[in-house]
Image (cartoon, grey):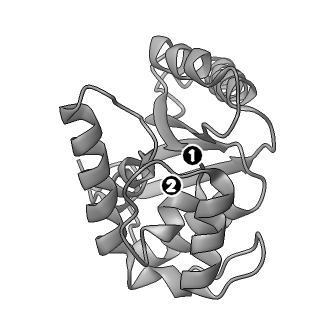
């Protein structure tokens, strides 16, 4: 008997870039044991968490109406940046308190994309990360072609882990620069349970 597919709900701060990367990654991972629904919200981190909670709750209510008592999503993810958002820490706490998974980046999601091409140590501002990404990738806009990143994924994941490990070792989790986006991609790629 075939195991049921894991279902992931991913609510993103960005409307275009993050969902486009996730869609490309999902296709490239060729993991038929997972289903990913990503939503590009275009709102601040707190709104992303509120939307993720609301979508999960609506899916649970629909399941009860359909007499299906299994959880609608195995994992619910929130993807957002620190940027200059004043409610970043509040959003992180709310996500954790509600059992939501975090794929937060400091200073911005483009850090994750940059890690596909090069290391990035030391505090960076959003504009600097975006400039370094443009230089490394040759890209000029918000839209991305996942194929440009696909063969560099493993190195980006390793670099992101190293940044996160160093930050935690120094007692500064989620500091600039770090990104937890690799945990989301690891979950998408994970076969069977």
Q: Of helix, strand and loop, which one carries label 2?
A: strand
Give residue 121's position: percent from left, percent from top: 37, 57
Q: Residue furthest left?
A: 169
Q: Which residue occupies 60% across, 83% down? A: 135
* Mark whose residue sits in front, 2 or 1: 1
17 sits left or right of 111 in the view: right
What residue is drawn where x is 57% and y is 46%? 107
Horizontal and vertical percent for residue 169? 18, 34
Q: Earlier in the sequence, mark 2 or mark 1?
A: 2
Q: Which residue is mark 2?
A: 35
The spot of residue 62 in percent (x, y) is: 69, 24
With 48 as the anchor, is 10 left or right in this view? left
Residue identified by numbered label 1: 107
Circles 2 and 1: CB atoms closer than 8 Å? no
Q: Is residue 159 above or below residue 117?
A: above
Task: Please tell me which residue lies in front, 83 or 62.
Answer: 83
Q: Is residue 135 left or right of residue 127?
A: left
Question: Which quarter of the picture shows residue 43?
Answer: top right
- Characterize the local packing of mark 2: few (<14), some (14-19) or many (20 or more) Cα atoms within 10 angstroms: some
* Location of residue 185 by image quarter: bottom left
Q: Which one is nearer the viewer's eye here, 10 or 155?
A: 155
Residue 150 location (% of width, % of height):
45, 81
Question: Measuring 54% from the left and 32% from the top, which residue is drawn there?
Answer: 72
Q: CA distance from mark 2 to mark 1?
A: 29 Å
Which residue occupies 45% across, 18% down?
Answer: 96
Q: Which mark is residue 66?
A: none
- Mark 1 neighbour density, 10 Å: few (under 14) some (14–19) many (20 or more): many
Q: Secondary structure at mark 1?
A: loop
């Amino acid at each position: 008997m075939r195991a049921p597919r894991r279902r992931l709900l991913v609510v993103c701060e960005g409307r275009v870039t993050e969902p486009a990367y996730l869609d490309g990654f999902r296709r490239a991972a060729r993991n038929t044991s997972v289903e990913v629904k990503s939503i590009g919200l275009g709102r601040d981190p707190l709104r992303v968490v509120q939307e993720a909670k609301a979508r999960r709750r609506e899916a649970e209510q629909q399941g009860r109406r359909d007499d299906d008592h299994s959880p609608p999503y195995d994992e619910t993810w929130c993807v957002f940046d620190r940027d200059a958002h004043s409610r970043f820490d509040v959003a992180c706490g709310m996500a954790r308190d509600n059992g939501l998974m975090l794929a937060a980046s400091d200073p911005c999601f483009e850090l994750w994309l940059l890690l596909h091409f090069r290391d990035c140590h030391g505090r960076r501002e959003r504009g600097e990360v975006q400039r370094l990404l443009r230089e490394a990738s040759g890209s000029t806009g918000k839209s991305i072609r996942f194929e440009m990143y696909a063969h560099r994924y493993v190195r980006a994941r390793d670099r992101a882990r190293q940044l996160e490990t160093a930050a935690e070792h120094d007692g500064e989790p989620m500091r600039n620069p770090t990104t937890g986006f690799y945990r989301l991609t690891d979950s998408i790629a994970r076969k069977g349970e």
